[in-house]
C-alpha cells in the first residue's frame, strides 16, 4: 500500500488550517499507487487528495507537475487541480516532505480495458497534447535514452537473476534504440505514464486523467506508444494472455487522430517508439525488482511483462502491425 509517511492528527490539522476548506472530517491512506503517499481527505468543505511526495519525485520538478495540472484543468481537461492555501501557495510541506492538496476526481479505473476504453484514451491523450501545447514550462524526459543508459548500467549485471539472457537483451536493445532514436518529431508536454490506473471512467465514459508525476517534454507520439503498451496487450491471465490486440490499437490511434493528426514521420516511427517505451518500463520495473527491500509492502511490478511487449515491437516491421 502506498502510504510511506504517516501523518499525525496534530500535523494534519495545522496543515489544513492554512487553507479555506473547512475542518477535517476524515483522512484515510489510499492503498493504490507505488510512488507517493496519498490520502483521501474529507473536510466540511469537500473531498480532496492529499499527496506527500516520496523518493522518485524531485522537489524541483513539483512546480512543473502542479503548474501543468492547473494549466490543463483551466483549459477544460478533466484532471485534478492543485488547491491553493490562503497565501496563494499550493506546494507546501508536511511531515518533512513536500506536500500538496489536489482536487478529487470521481470515477474508477478500468480493471479490464475494453475497445471502447482504448478509443477514448486515444482521444483524451490527443486532447491533453493540444491543451498542453501552450504550457510555458519545460521538463526534459529523464527516462528517455540517457536515463535508460543509466538504468541498463545499474541493472545489467544482475538482470539474469530475473531471466537468463536478460542482461544481453537490454544492452543490445539500448544500443539499437540509441543508434536509431528519432530526432525531428513533434514535441510537447506528454503525460508519460497514462496506464489504466491513471484513467478514470464513470460507466463507459472517460471521466478524467490523474498522476502527472512523470509528465515531461518529449515526442508526442512517444506518449501514444506508451499507451499502446499499457492498454492494448491482453491481461496476463485469461485465454489470450499477453497477446497484442490490434483492434484496440487501431481504435486508440484512430481516436487520437480525430483530434490531432499524426504525420507520416510519426507513424513510421511508431514501432521504434513502442520499443523505446517497452524498454523504459522494463528497465524501471527491473530496477525496482532488483532493489526493493525484502518485506517491503509495495509489490514490485513484473518486468518480464514488458520483455514480452518489447519482443512484439521488435518484430513489427511498420505501423501496419498496429492495425493501420
Ligand atoms: N485526484 C484524484 N481523485 C481521486 N482519486 C485519486 C486522485 N489522485 C489519486 N487518486 C487515487 O489514489 C491512487 C494513487 O494515486 P497515483 O496513481 O497518483 O499514485 P502514485 O503513488 O503516483 O502511483 P503510480 O505512479 O504507481 O500510479 C489512485 O489509483 C486513485 O485511486
Ligand atoms: N506505470 C508504471 C508504474 C508507475 O509509474 C508501471 O506500470 O511500471
Image (cartoon, grey):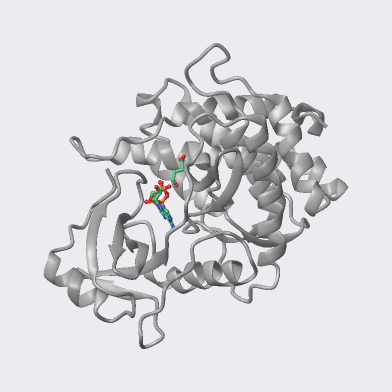
Quick one: 162 or 153, which is closer to the camera?
162
Most extreme residue toward the bottom is 87
Query: Residue 71 appears in which quarter of the rendering?
Result: bottom right
Does residue 309 lie above or below 222 as drawn? above
Residue ID at (63%, 37%): 117
Q: Position of residue 229 (x, y in %)?
A: 60, 35
Q: Position of residue 52 (x, y in %)?
A: 30, 62
Looking at the image, can residue 258 be seen? yes
Looking at the image, can residue 176 be seen? no
Most extreme residue toward the right is 264
Most extreme residue toward the top is 239
Residue ID at (35%, 25%): 161
> Quadrant of the image for the C terminus?
top right
Ligand 2 - quadrant of the structure image: top left
Residue ID at (51%, 36%): 110
- The mark tally for this picture is 0
Q: Position of residue 67 (x, y in %)?
A: 52, 73
Q: Position of residue 96 (x, y in %)?
A: 21, 70
Query: Residue 98 appears in which quarter of the rendering?
Result: bottom left
Quick one: 306 or 114, which is closer to the camera?
114
Residue ID at (79%, 54%): 260
| Left or right: residue 199 compared with residue 51 | right
> Quadrant of the image for the N terminus?
top left
Amino acid at each position: 500500500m502506498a502510504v510511506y509517511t504517516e501523518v499525525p492528527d496534530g500535523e494534519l490539522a495545522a496543515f489544513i488550517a492554512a487553507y479555506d476548506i473547512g475542518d477535517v472530517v476524515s483522512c484515510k491512506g489510499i492503498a493504490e499507487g507505488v510512488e507517493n503517499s496519498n490520502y483521501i481527505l474529507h473536510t466540511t468543505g469537500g473531498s480532496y487528495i492529499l499527496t506527500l511526495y516520496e523518493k522518485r519525485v524531485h522537489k524541483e520538478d513539483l512546480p512543473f507537475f502542479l503548474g501543468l495540472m492547473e494549466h490543463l484543468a483551466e483549459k477544460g481537461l478533466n484532471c485534478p487541480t492543485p488547491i491553493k492555501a490562503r497565501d496563494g501557495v499550493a506546494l507546501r510541506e508536511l511531515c518533512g516532505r513536500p506536500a500538496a492538496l489536489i482536487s478529487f476526481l470521481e470515477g474508477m479505473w478500468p480493471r479490464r480495458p475494453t475497445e471502447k476504453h482504448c478509443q477514448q484514451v486515444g482521444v483524451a491523450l490527443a486532447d491533453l497534447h493540444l491543451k498542453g501545447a501552450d504550457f510555458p514550462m519545460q521538463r526534459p524526459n529523464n527516462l528517455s535514452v540517457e536515463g535508460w543508459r543509466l538504468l541498463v548500467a545499474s541493472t545489467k549485471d544482475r538482470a539474469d537473476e530475473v531471466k537468463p539472457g536478460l542482461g544481453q537483451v537490454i544492452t543490445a536493445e539500448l544500443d539499437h534504440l540509441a543508434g536509431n532514436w528519432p530526432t525531428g518529431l513533434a514535441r510537447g508536454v506528454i503525460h508519460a505514464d497514462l496506464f489504466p490506473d491513471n484513467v478514470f471512467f464513470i460507466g463507459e465514459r472517460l471521466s478524467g486523467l490523474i498522476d502527472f508525476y512523470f509528465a515531461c517534454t518529449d515526442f508526442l507520439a512517444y506518449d501514444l506508444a506508451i499507451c499502446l503498451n499499457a492498454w492494448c496487450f491482453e491481461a496476463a491471465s485469461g485465454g489470450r494472455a499477453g497477446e497484442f490486440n490490434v483492434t484496440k490499437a487501431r481504435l486508440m490511434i484512430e481516436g487520437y487522430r480525430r483530434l490531432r493528426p499524426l504525420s507520416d514521420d510519426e507513424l513510421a516511427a511508431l514501432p521504434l517508439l513502442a520499443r523505446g517505451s517497452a524498454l523504459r518500463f522494463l528497465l524501471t520495473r527491473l530496477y525496482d525488482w532488483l532493489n526493493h527491500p525484502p518485506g517491503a509492502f509495495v509489490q514490485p511490478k513484473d518486468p518480464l511483462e514488458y520483455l514480452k511487449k518489447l519482443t512484439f515491437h521488435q518484430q513489427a516491421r511498420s505501423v501496419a502491425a498496429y492495425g493501420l
